Amino acid sequence: MTSGDPLRNLGVRLGANGGELRVWSKNADSMELCIFDETDPNWIVKTVPMTRDTNDVWFGRSRTLSPGRRYGIRVSGPASARNSFHPEKTLIEPYSRGLVRVGPDQWQSSVVDGGFDWAGSVKPKIALDHTVVYEAHVRGLSKLNPAVPADLRGTYAGLAHESTIGYLKNLGVTTVELLPVHAFVSEQRLIKQGLTNYWGYNTFNFFSPHADYATMASQSAGPEAVLREFKGMVKLLHEAGLEVILDVVYNHTAEEGPNGPVSSLRGIDNATYYRQNDAGAYIDVTGCGNTLNVSHEVPHRLVLDSLRYWANDVQIDGFRFDLAVTLGRDGNVEYQRDHPLLTAIRTDPDLTDVKLIAEPWDIGQGGWQTGNFADGWTEWNDRYRDRMRSFWLTDLAAARDGHAGSGIGRFATRLAGSSNTFSQERGPLASLNFITAHDGFTMADLTAYNVKHNVGNGESNRDGTDSNNSFNHGVEGPTRNTTILTTRRKAMRNLLATLLLSAGVPMITAGDEFGRSQRGNNNAYCHDSELTWLNWDLDDWQVDLHRVSRRLLELRRENPALRPVRFGRPGETTLSASEMDWYNALGESMSEEDWHSSDERTLQYLAASTPEREEFNRILLIVQGREADVTVTLPVHTGVGSYTLLWDSSHDDISDAVIEHAPGARLLVPGASMQLFRAH
C-alpha cells in the first residue's frame, strides 16, 4: 500500500486527537458516525456527519473515538432494486476490531487499541512436507477436558492451556486448524428452532474474534481483553512450536438472503458488496443466501485487509478458505484460477510464508475445481477422501455380497500424491489429504453406520450428505459383537495409516485419533453439546487407537520417503521426490493389467527418498485390501538387503512378531491390513 492508495486505512485509526473512521460506499448519499455512552448502550452521546472524498470513502473524526468506546454508523441512500439502505439502523463498521453485544440481535462496534507484547514469540514456519494439520473446534477441544481448569474449558485460553498443548505435542501434530473464529451469529432459521450454529460458518465481521470463545473474565472486560486472550493463545502455541491456521469464511456473510438481517455490508452498499442481477435478485453460489462480490475492488480489498490483519497483527500462520471457488469468480460469476483476488492472496508481500488451503468447490455452475488452483495453494482433496473410504469400507462391503470393488491402481495413485489431479509443477503437497473433516461422519462412525442419523438436526434427516462411503460391518451403530468391534477397529487403523503414510499434507479431525463418535450424525453443525465436544474419558480400545495414531505420526516424521515434496519423472532423479516402485503379491513389478484390474487388491509400494535436506530413506508399504489372508513375496530390489517391520495394522503390538525379513521371503499378510517396513 502507498500513501496514494484510495482505500488506505479503512476502519478506525487512532491518533493523538482521538480517532478517525473511514468507510467506503459509492451508493450512499449520507453517512454519520454514532458514538454511544460508555454505560447505556441505547444512548448516542455524539453524532458526527461523515464527509465523502473523491474515492467514495466517507470519513469522520472525533476525540471521543478512543479505546473501549462503542460506535456504529447510519447510512442513507436512494431506494432501488439493488440497494438496501435503512437509515434508522445503526450498523457494524466492516473493519471493526471488536464487537459488543447489546441486545439479543443487536451489536455495536468497539474501538480496540490492539497493543500486545509478543515477547519475542515467532511463527514456527513448519515446512509443508513436515506439516500435519489437526482440525479442531475451539470450544469442542477442551470443553470436557478435566485437565483444563473449569473456567478455561471451551475457550481460547483453554486451547492454550499447558495440558492441551501438551496433548497436541505428544500426539505429534504440527498445525492446529481452527473452525471459524471470526465473529459469527446463528442463522435466523436455527434461532427459531432453538438451535445454534456451532461450526461458525456464518461470519458477522472479518476482523473481530468470536467473543463467546473467550473466558467469562475476558468477555466481561470487553473486546480488548478478548483480543488479548486470542493473541495470548497464538503466542503460547507458537512458543510450543505449533502453528495456527484459521478456517475463514469470506464467500458470504451472516446477513443471509435479501430478507435477512441488515447489520453491516447490506446497509452500507448492498449493490456493491453482494452479487446480484440487474433486478436486484441475489446470485447465491454458496447456499447461504448471499455471495460476496469479490470481483469488485472494494470487497476484494476487504478480504485482503482482513487476511493481512490476522497474519501480521495476530500472527496467524495460514488460512483454510471455505468455498474458495467463490473467491475466484469473475464479473460473469465464472471461476478463474488466476482471478485477481486468488492471485493477490498468494503473491501479496504481506502474506509471505502464509499457508494457503482451498476448499476447491462451491455450489455454483462449474463449482467443482479440485486440482485447478494455481501453484502456492494446497487443496482439500475430496477425490482422495472418497477413494480411500471406498477401498477400505464400501469395497469390502461389496465383496461380502459377491461384487467386485475398485482395484488397487486408483488407491495407489492417491497414496502417491494424486498426480492425476495435481500438476507436475505443483507436486504432491498441493493435496490436502483427509479421510474425515468437521463436515461428515467421524472416522469411528464411518465404520459403524451405513446411513446418516441426523433427526436431531430438526430437518427430518434430510440434511447432510447421503454419499458417505461408509460400512457398518454388519450392525448399524453400537454393538457388543466382539467380531464386529474388532473388525471396525482394524478398519480405523487402516484409515489412519492410509492418511498418515500417504504423500501430501495430512489432516486429522480432532478426536479421530481415539475413535470419537457423533452417534451417526454426519452434519452436526447445529449442536453445541456433548455430541460434538471431545470426550476425554477414553475406553481401553480408544487408548490403544491413540497410541497407534502417535506411532503413525512418529513413523511419518522419521521416514522422508513418505513425505515427497515433488513428483518424480521417469528416468530422472528429482531432488525431494520419492522414487517409487510398485509390486504385486508375487513380488513382481505391477503390470498394466494389475494396475487396472478390479480383482487386484494387494500392493507392495517401495519408495526411496532423493535427499535434499534429510538422510536417505527407503520404505516398503504392503497393502492387503481383501478380508482373506494372502501370502506375499517381498520384492527383490537393487540396494535392498533386508526389510525391518515397523508397524502392522492387524496387530496392536508387534513385539512378538518376526521383525527382520529378506528380499524374496514369503510372508503371510492378514486380511484387510497394512504393514510398513524400512528397507535397508
Image (cartoon, rainbow, N blue to C red):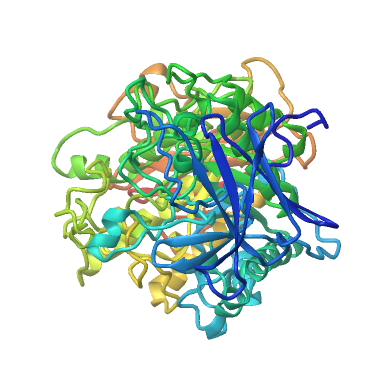
Q: Quadrant of the N terminus?
A: top right
State the image quarter where residue 407 is shown.
Answer: top left
Report whether residue 580 is seen: yes
> Residue 505, percent across and down?
57, 42
**Nearer to the camera, 115 or 392:** 115
> Residue 391, percent across and down?
33, 39
**Nearer to the camera, 637 or 190:** 190
Q: Image check: 505 left or right of 347?
A: left
Q: Quadrant of the C terminus?
A: top right
Q: Is residue 588 above or below residue 265?
A: above
> Residue 275, percent across and down?
42, 28
Q: Image check: 402 left or right of 253?
A: left
Q: Is residue 410 above or below residue 527?
A: above
Residue at 57% x, 84% y is 149
Q: Image check: 416 left or right of 449?
A: right
Residue at 50% x, 78% y is 145
Residue at 67% x, 60% y is 111
Report whether residue 659 is seen: no
> Residue 518, percent across and down?
31, 63
**Nearer to the camera, 295 or 248:** 295
Number of labelled discs?
A: 0
